[in-house]
Image (tube, helix red, strand yellow):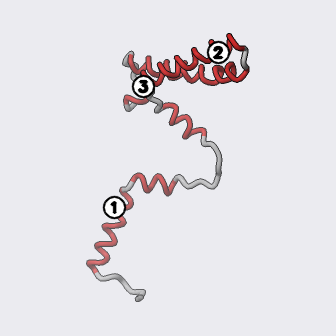
Amino acid sequence: MSLGRLPEHEQHILDEIERSLRRDRRLNRLLRGRRTRRGPDPKRFAARVARCDPRGRTVALLAVMSAALMVTGLVTAAPWAMWTFAVVWPVVVFLGFRLLSRWSGDAGPSDGR
């Protein structure tokens, strides 16, 4: 391979490829986002939580499941039921508030602001 300048048409093609690669936002984000650190990323987790957009059926199903766990825990005094309820209930409350907020028309992160 020669070390001299490329012919004009090949240089033009190469320039066009470089321009299209510079405009590719996804590629830029991937190249910039390379991290050596492993483990949970709090910023990414916060972004996922902010994008959370629950459906009514999901919240209703989780609410029924948490009520069943609560009754099971009260009747049987089973620790697994109480601990499972303790884990599921805050999720139900959070998703319920997000759903009600969306239904009420509150301008949130899902509205593009």
Q: Residues within 10 Å of mark 1 (few under 14, many from 20)?
A: few
Residue 105 picture location, percent across and down: 37, 18
Q: Earlier in the sequence, mark 1 or mark 3?
A: 1
Q: Quadrant of the C terminus?
A: top left
Viewer-proximal residue, 1 or 97? Answer: 97
Label 1 is placed on what type of residue? Ser
Position above or below: 3 against 92: below
Instruction: Examine the image and state in which quarter residue 21 appears.
Output: bottom left
CA gap between label 1 and label 3 equals 38 Å
At a point 28% along the width and 73% down the height, the residue shown is: 12
Label 3 is placed on what type of residue? Arg
Residue 110 picture location, percent across and down: 40, 30
**Mark in front: 3 vs 2:** 2
At a point 57% along the width and 24% down the height, the residue shown is: 91
Q: Earlier in the sequence, mark 3 or mark 2?
A: 3
Query: What element does badge 2 sit on?
Result: helix
Q: Report which residue position mark 2 lands on.
A: 72
Label 2 is placed on what type of residue? Thr
Residue 28 picture location, percent across and down: 44, 55
Q: Report which residue position mark 1 lands on.
A: 20
At a point 73% along the width and 20% down the height, the residue shown is: 79
